[in-house]
Image: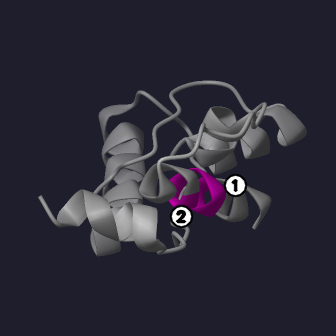
Amino acid sequence: MPAVLDAAAVGAALAAGRPLPSLPGLAARCMANSPASLLAARYGLAGPLAAPATACAAGASALADAAALIASGAADVALAGGADACVDAVTLAGFAR
């Protein structure tokens, strides 16, 4: 949750016209591939790494991608899944345009 709280602080500063707070590592913690990268590093996994950004279908997209890699012979096994994203004012603002 710290990344979400940091992102909210940035959004509040932008809305109020204040200087942006210094938040080291915010971008890395908010990147879509962070969970996949952390799992790969923790368990010593190698090979293709992807983080489909297909909203509510991300988990299904990841499973389909993993199945295609195995079917094509590009991978023997795959770790695939999905994760939920926190929704806050900054994220919602992105859909408002």
Residue 61 drawn above or below residue 10: below
Residue 10 in the magenta stretch? The answer is yes
Splitting the image into 4 quarters, where does residue 86 fall? Answer: bottom right
Image x and y of residue 24, in percent: 78, 31
Magenta-colored span: 7-12
The residue shown at (59%, 47%) is 30
The numbered dot on residue 81 is 2
Q: Between residues 30 and 9, which one lies in front from this camera angle?
A: 9
Question: Residue 32 appears at what percent x and percent y?
Answer: 51, 46
User: Farthest residue toward the left?
Assistant: 97
The answer to whether residue 87 is left or right of residue 56 is right
34 falls in the magenta region: no
Dot 1: what SS? helix
Q: Quadrant of the C terminus?
A: bottom left
Residue kind at label 1, given as amino acid type: Asp
Is 70 displayed left or right of 33 in the figure?
left
Q: Quadrant of residue 68?
A: top left
Q: Which mark is residue 6?
A: 1
